[in-house]
Each structure stands twice: as C-alpha cells, then as structure tokens.
Image (spheres, helix red, strand yellow):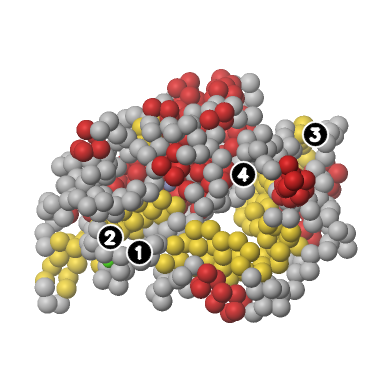
Amino acid sequence: MKKKFIVPVALSSVILVGSIPLSGVFAKPIDSKVVSSVQVAKKWNEKASVPFFVKDRFTEKFSSSTSSNALNYLKKNEDKTGIKHPDKNLKVKSTEKDKLGMTHVRFNQTINGLNVEGSEVIVHFNKNNEVVSVNGRINQTIDDGTVDTTASLSSDDALKTALTSVNAPDELTYEPTSELVVYPFEGENHTAYKVNVNFMGDEPGNWFVYVDAKTGEVIDKYNGIMDFDEFKPQNGVGKGVHGAHRDLHISQVKEPKSGTKFALADLAHENLGGIFTFDSKNDTNTKNDTLYVGNSAAFIGDYDRAAVDAHYNSEKVYEYYLKEHGRNSLDGKGMAINSYVHYDKNYNNAFWNGAWMTYGDGDGEFFISLSAGLDVAAHEMTHGVISHTANLVYRNQPGALNESFTDVFGALVDDKDWEIGEEIMAPAAKANGVTRLRSMSDPNSVVVSNAQRAAYGSGVYPAHMKEYYNMPQSVDNGGVHVNSSITNHAAYLIGQEIGRKKLGQIYYRAISVYLTPNSNFSDARKAIVQSAIDLYGEGSAEEAAANSGFDAVGIY
Ligand SMILES: [Ca+2]
Ligand SMILES: [Ca+2]
Ligand SMILES: [Zn+2]
C-alpha cells in the first residue's frame, strides 16, 4: 500500500495560504564539509512536518458537521488537500463546536494505526455544515509505506529505559504512560515508545522520552515542565507578599480530634471540580503536602499570604476563561484546579507540571512569592489550557509560542499593564532596575539576566525576528522564554489597535481551533489572522491589525 501525502502547489478552487516551511535563514554558519549532510537532514526534517492551510472558496455542504463527514470531505478532495487515503491515514482526535457555531474536527496522522507524532489535520465546518478550510502539519516523508511499525521491545522494557534516562525518583506523580508511535527525528521515522514520566522532587520533571521500539535506544527526550522562568536560588530571606485584602471561597473541615478547621477549598462553582490550594511545606518532598488548612476563616498570617494569593488568583483566571471564552477550567470539562505553594526553599520559579500549578516563595532577593502575580497565575494556568488544546511542544518555536500565549493571557487577565511579573519582583531587584521579568510593550528594555542564554543574542529580549536567538535545545529548551518576546510584542501591537477584549477572542481561537503541536511562528500568524477573519470578517480592521502586528516583528 502506497501512502502519499502531497500538498498541492496551486489548485483552481483552492487558495493555498502557506505550504512553505520557515526557511533556515536564521541558522548559524556551518563548516562547509558537513553542509551537504546537514542540508539533507534539514530538508528531511522539513518534509517530515509540512505546514498547510487550505481555504476552500467553493464550499461543500454536508447534512451535519461530524467527524465522518469531515473524513468524507477529505476522501473526496484528496487532490485539493494532498492528503492521500485519509480513511487509512487519519484518526479522529476530537470534534469541537465553537461559539460561532463552527465545528472543528481534529485528526492525527497515522501509519498502520500508530500516531505520527506532531502531525495533525483540522477540518473546519462553518455553521451551515460546509467545509471552509483544512489546516495542520503533515509528515510527507512517509510516502512509500516503508515504515515498519512492529516493535521488538516490550512496553515494560521501554519504560525501564525511560525511567533510567531521566534519573526518575521512586515516587512518581502518576503512573507513567507509554504509547507506541511513529516519531520523525533527524532524518528517520522511528517506531518508538513515547513514555511520559512525571515527578516532583529537587528537579521536577514531566519528561517525554522516545525509546526506539527496535533497538531500545533513547532517540530523544525533553522535559515538558512549563515554568514561568528559571532563576537559581540564592541565600536570602523571603519577604511577605503584598498585604491586599482578599475575599476567598473556602470550606469548613471537621476533623475528629481537632474540631472545625477551614480549608482553601473552593467548591462554589457549578460544574467545576473545585479550586484547591495545597501547602508544599517548604521542601521538595510531596509526601508531607496537605490541603492548606487554618484554624479560622481568616487567613491573615504571614505564612498564609502566598496561599491566599494562589487561591484568589486561581479563581480570577478560572472566571476569565469561563466568562470570556465559555471555557470551564483548564481542560474545558471542569477539572479541579490545584495549586501548591511554599514549594522548596527560596525557590525562584513557578510551573505547570502537566497536572497542577506549583509556586515557590522566591529568594527575597530577585523574586518574592510567585503566587503574588496574577499574570504569573494566568501564565501557568494557560499552560494547562494549551496542554488541552493546541498542545504546543515545549521547545524551539512551538515552545516559544507556548511561552508567548501564556504571557499574552497573563496580560489579558492581569490587564493593568503589558509587563510580566512586575508584582513578584523583590525590593532588591527593583532597586537594581529589574522591575519586571519580561515586557511585551518594549522587550528590548529588559536584560536577559541568565548569562548562558544571553550569549546567543544581543543580551536583551528580542522584539523582532532579526534579533532571534538561535539556541540549542539544551539551553532553555531552544529559547522558549527568550524568543517568546518576539510574538509577545506582535500581540502587544495588535492589542494597541483593537483592545484587549478582541485580542483575547482572537488568541483564544488560535490556540483552541487552529494551532497544532508543531506549529511555528509563521503558522501562528496564519492562525491568528484566520481567527480575526472568522470573528470580525474578511477585510476587517481586526484582520488588518493582526497582519500589521506580525509584519512589524518580521514574522510572515
Ligand atoms: Ca512538601
Ligand atoms: Ca503584569
Ligand atoms: Zn511558562
């Protein structure tokens, strides 16, 4: 069986918005002797993840917007989309209706029933059940059906290899998962076990390890812990968080021996599993963690402050997504929102580990308690939203987009400014002129304080593609917290034209409807422009603002 995926170059009834991968114009110069093999590998890598965005001018009407009709469309229009034998090579992942009445059917590319990592196709129906567009990324190297998808290694052996390769501790956050997939990596489609290993401890990990199912070797791995940004702890004493009064939803807990207590457990929201705040007790051991409990309904002690802010800000972010986007919690299905405060000692970071939020107290020199920042909470919780929507891979450009969308929603929920982290800077940092961690309005005004990262660019956060930091994956997962400033700045510029409310609508639509795990900056532009068109019309001021925002930062 031949399996071909070809993206059309030009077709009569189709406008091809973009099918050319981002070129390597930003690559560093390489030794001429290795150029040819590098170019071959690069070409293969590009072919293994080809972006496409096909808009159909002559729409086809169906009786309903179902996944089977989406497949019927793809079967009838192989020539238009270039996706051959969609019934064999695609598997339905999700079907979602949005508030415009459009329905979006997301497919995984498969071979012999195995998911091809990162390759997704989305078919978009308008409210009249007509297919109006198809977009995504397709692996075009699988055109001769030669991928042998049988495994000689057992899933258990792959798991053992993965655990060893990431130095996993005995205690894991949840049972590791293992899935046989086709993993395109550096010139080859590997049949591999994708193993997810999640743990807390000194170096928290949400590792994705790809173990070759033939040879048992680790092909690739990365840590998907999505953090705010990393600063190495120094010695210092944590100060209290700002003393703002907070009205909280809490719960009474009756304990047999100690009588009535009060817990940071918010069960006041319909169809939500609750908002809970836990105490990590200033260490990295999770065994002693407990729900945050007090003797009275007033949480006014110094130690309470970080917990109060985490609890309060979680509810704020929950309400933003519900009211603005009709989204019920991070997964859209009312999953409980859990936050852990007082993680480790002097810990200068906050992160989403794939299941919950964790906040450090800061070292008191650079940061104070990270839960004090509403933009930080919105940032972390948006990582959770993205995990359940576009699921952008946390490295290189998809990872920088992940970091950028989280900052954008940070600035939409914490709508006082376009700065990120201004509420969590310690007095000493502010005294040294470090008044925020990142700036969407003026990225260049903030110094990249991590010297290892700064070495790959001008030393300040980039505001344009010509200032792009070419970083290896070993440094900041390929620059996820640095290059995010380029797309952050585009969002700021668009926001200046159309305001926060519309910006939020457009950006939410882009992550929930159009973006896929391997989307790059150029895909993001297309997704955002198309979202503006869907919401405000072709030729609208909002579409123009989206285009000019990306023009201004050099993303095409
Ligand atoms: Ca603990
Ligand atoms: Ca802010
Ligand atoms: Zn982040």
Q: Nearer the viewer, mark 4 or mark 1?
A: 1
Q: Secondary structure at mark 3?
A: strand
Which residue is pictured at 35% across the width and 37% down the height? 437
**Residue 241 placement (x, y as % from top left):** 19, 45
**Residue 371 placement (x, y as % from top left):** 28, 48
The vertical placement of 523 against 198, above or below, is above
Real-space CA distance between mark 1 and mark 2, rounded to the nearest whole angstrom? 8 Å
Callout 1 environment at 10 Å: few (<14), some (14 to 19), or many (20+)?
Answer: few
Callout 3 environment at 10 Å: few (<14), some (14 to 19), or many (20+)?
Answer: some
Real-space CA distance between mark 2 and mark 3, rounded to the nearest whole angstrom? 55 Å
Numbered label attached to residue 14: 3
Query: Amino acid type of disc 1?
Result: Asp
Q: Nearer the viewer, mark 1 or mark 3?
A: 1
Q: Which residue is mark 2?
A: 344
Query: Amino acid type of disc 3?
Result: Val
Which residue is pictured at 47% across the width and 62% down the height? 206
Find out whether the residues at labels 1 and 2 contact each other: C-beta distance under 8 Å.
yes
Q: Which residue is mark 4?
A: 519
Mark closest to the chain's N terminus, 4 or 3: 3
Mark closest to the chain's N terminus, 1 or 3: 3
Q: Secondary structure at mark 1?
A: loop
